Image (spheres, helix red, strand yellow):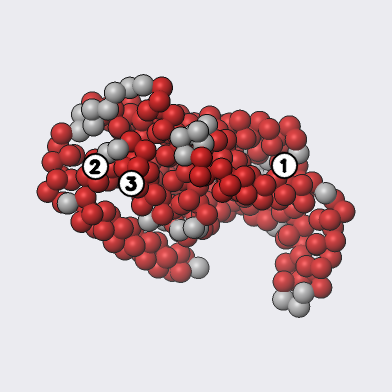
């Protein structure tokens, strides 16, 4: 399994190299290099702070979810486990974040099938938060309204299905009858029980609010990157940057590519050109800078956290969840 993950990561990195090569050629490499040289690098620390706010708020949500499903983990270890999930961002379909469940199993003997629903709930509320942020920009790009409405409707349907015990139990019964999948029915039930707790009205409302706040931090990061290229700081620019980042991230998420590679960069570059009347060079440079500050910064931070977590001597006390 480790070898398979390593192969997937290598393929993802190779794909990332192709994506960035294509963007470099699109923007004209010499002009792109000149754009980077002329970017006001004094904005970099503030941009990274905005990104760290995103991570901080998302950690609050993660830790809150642990409390909701009654997995008491000390805040320091919880933070390291949360950040460690970023280290495998390049595994397709966000499956790398299941590392958090593996680490909970390793350190606290919490069943992976029970805690894995936290990762699913995080992704669900991430998308809801992004839809909320993108909704602010529909006046700029009204063509996006149908797609946002369909996405939100699908998410609401998922929540309703999970909160309906009757429907869920019938689905579980059908699942149990399947020849191969039926052997994993007990794991599905375990996952459902924790998902049911997290998607009740109060936890869902709190988590969606935290998600919107967290991802607004990365929308601000794009806004700050654009300021570094000499754009004037106005409420309209912040609105457009928020819409661009939210839509590009949503588009990247639905492709299930590792880190949204390709789809996020392509749509962000196109939207910056379309909505900000920027050149291909500036749009590409802004996209690459914000992706370095969000995607690749997270991977590095996750690797450091995983290393620190591995240095913690001894095993912590098991909580006692079944495996």
Secondary element at image label 1: loop
Q: Is residue 112 left or right of residue 212?
A: right
Residue, disc 3: 269
Asked whether the viewer can see residue 9, the reply is: yes
Q: Position of residue 184 (x, y in %)?
A: 72, 67
Residue, disc 2: 279
Secondary element at image label 2: loop
Q: Position of residue 105 (x, y in %)?
A: 61, 52
Q: Quadrant of the C terminus?
A: bottom right
> What separation in Å lies between label 3 and label 1 (alpha carbons)?
35 Å
Tag in front: 3 or 1:
3
Pick whichever of labels 2 and 3 is earlier in the sequence.
3
Q: Position of residue 136 (x, y in %)?
A: 52, 31
Residue, disc 1: 199
Identity of the residue drawn at 44% across and 29% down: 239
Q: Label 2 crowding class (10 Å Cα cut-off): few <14, some 14-19, many 20+?
A: some
Identity of the residue drawn at 80% across and 62% down: 171
Question: Residue 59 sits in which quadrant?
Answer: top right
């Amino acid at each position: 399994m480790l070898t398979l993950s390593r192969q997937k990561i290598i393929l993802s990195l190779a794909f990332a190299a192709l994506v960035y090569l294509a963007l470099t050629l699109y923007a004209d490499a010499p002009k792109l290099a000149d754009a980077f040289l002329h970017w006001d690098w004094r904005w970099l620390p503030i941009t990274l702070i905005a990104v760290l706010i995103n991570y901080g708020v998302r950690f609050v949500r993660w830790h809150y979810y642990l409390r909701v499903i009654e997995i008491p983990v000390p805040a320091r270890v919880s933070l390291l486990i949360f950040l460690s999930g970023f280290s495998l961002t390049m595994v397709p379909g966000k499956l790398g974040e299941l590392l958090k469940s593996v680490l909970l199993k390793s350190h606290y003997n919490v069943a992976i099938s029970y805690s894995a629903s936290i990762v699913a709930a995080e992704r669900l509320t991430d998308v809801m938060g992004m839809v909320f942020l993108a909704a602010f920009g529909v006046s700029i790009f009204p063509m996006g309204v149908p797609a946002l409405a369909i996405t939100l409707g699908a998410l609401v349907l998922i929540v309703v299905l999970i909160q309906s015990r009757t429907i869920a139990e019938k689905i579980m019964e059908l699942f149990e009858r399947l020849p191969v999948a039926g052997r994993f029915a007990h794991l599905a039930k375990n996952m459902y029980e924790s998902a049911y707790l997290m998607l009740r009205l109060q936890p869902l409302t709190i988590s969606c609010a935290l998600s919107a706040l967290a991802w607004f931090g990365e929308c601000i990061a794009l806004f700050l990157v654009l300021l570094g290229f000499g754009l004037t700081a106005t409420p309209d620019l912040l609105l457009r940057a928020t819409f661009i980042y939210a839509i590009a991230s949503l588009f990247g998420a639905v492709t299930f590519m590792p880190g949204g590679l390709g789809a996020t960069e392509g749509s962000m570059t196109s939207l910056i050109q379309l909505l900000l009347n920027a050149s291909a060079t500036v749009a590409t440079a802004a996209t690459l800078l914000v992706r370095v500050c969000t995607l690749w910064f997270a991977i590095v931070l996750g690797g450091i956290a995983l290393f620190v977590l591995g240095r913690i001597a001894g095993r912590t006390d098991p909580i006692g969840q079944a495996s």
